[in-house]
Image (spheres, grey):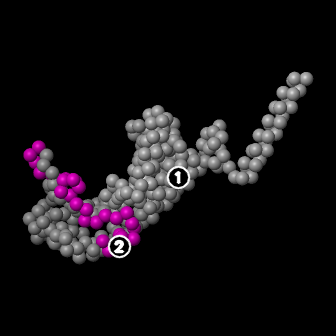
């Protein structure tokens, strides 16, 4: 992508980010935890963020899909639905109570027994999945050089699932995941049948809170590393960028040295003319 094309794309993305209109994500807005690191990255002329998620907890009921005349388990666009989803750790505790008291949700059974046929699981069983998905950020870079620098910085901070895709887009990912089945949909009664106890669900909730905390720490670590290794270490030959990072005293000293150097060159020129 040429320089002008990248600059145009970045300007368009930043306009969307700064727009008061909802974005295309299900949440409709940028996660608050992502804003500082996005602003940091977008301050660099050669990078722009394209999508982000600060991390979320969810409980998902699988759907069904038809494939080669067979009925198989499907995802969100195939009859699946979120029973609970949140990017905010303060909403973790108590989600099951809120779900049980939600009048729009089908009957719920917690800690099912044999009468719910929970021993007859197969490939067509639609499970209820408890998930924690960590921070992910996609960054479009002007060239492969800056993409490699961002990738290596991310890997050095423990974001080991990061990678560089087409068009120099860096996907920054980390493996702080949790994904476990906690129930199933009873096809006969259409009930949500949990085969774990409420005590076990509370255990998962506490593990998730720890993951939220670890995730936030890793984002902060990544922020600091990008700031020190990329933002503050731009091309020293670029005078404009250099001025952005120097203090008033450093600027005064630099101006004084530049003035003395100009005076020295002027004196040498006059001497040569004599």
Badge 1 is on which residue?
A: 40
Residue 93 shows which numbered tag? Answer: 2
Mark yes or no: residue 32 visible. Answer: yes
Q: Which quarter of the figure is the N terminus placed in?
A: top left
Q: At 11% from the left edge and 70% from the top edge, which residue is drawn? A: 115
Q: Position of residue 61 (x, y in %)?
A: 22, 61
Q: Is residue 61 above or below residue 111?
A: above
Q: Quadrant of residue 131?
A: bottom left
Q: Nearer the viewer, residue 51 or 83?
A: 51
Q: Is residue 172 left or right of residue 80?
A: right
First in sequence: mark 1 vs mark 2: 1
> Residue 144 has which mark?
none
Q: Residue at x 65, y 40 (%)?
A: 239
Would residue 88 be counted in the magenta stretch? Answer: yes
Give the residue displayed 49% in from the left and 44% down from the top.
47
The answer to the question of whether label 1 and label 2 lie on touching residues, with beta carbons closer than 8 A, is no
């Amino acid at each position: 992508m040429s320089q002008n094309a990248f600059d145009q794309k970045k300007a368009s993305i930043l306009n969307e980010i700064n727009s008061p209109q909802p974005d295309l994500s299900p949440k409709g807005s940028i996660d608050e935890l992502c804003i500082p690191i996005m602003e940091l990255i977008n301050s660099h002329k050669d990078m722009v963020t394209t999508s982000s998620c600060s991390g979320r907890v969810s409980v998902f009921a699988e759907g069904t899909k038809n494939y080669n005349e067979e009925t198989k388990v499907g995802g969100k666009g195939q009859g699946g639905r979120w029973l609970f989803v949140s990017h905010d750790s303060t909403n973790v505790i108590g989600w099951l109570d809120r779900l049980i008291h939600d009048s729009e949700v089908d009957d719920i059974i917690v800690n099912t027994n044999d009468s719910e046929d929970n021993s007859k699981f197969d490939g067509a069983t639609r499970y209820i999945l408890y998930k924690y998905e960590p921070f992910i950020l996609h960054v479009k870079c002007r060239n492969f050089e800056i993409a490699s620098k961002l990738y290596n910085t991310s890997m050095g901070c423990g974001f080991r699932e990061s990678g560089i895709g087409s068009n120099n887009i860096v996907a920054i990912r980390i493996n702080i995941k949790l994904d476990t089945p906690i129930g199933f949909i009873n096809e006969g009664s259409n009930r949500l049948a949990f085969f774990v106890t409420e005590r076990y669900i509370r255990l998962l909730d506490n593990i998730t809170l720890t993951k939220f905390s670890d995730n936030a720490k890793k984002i902060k670590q990544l922020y600091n590393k990008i700031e020190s290794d990329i933002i503050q270490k731009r091309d020293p030959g670029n005078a404009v960028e250099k001025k952005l990072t120097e203090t008033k005293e450093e600027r005064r000293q630099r101006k004084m040295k530049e003035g003395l150097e100009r005076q020295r060159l002027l004196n040498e020129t006059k001497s040569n003319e004599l």
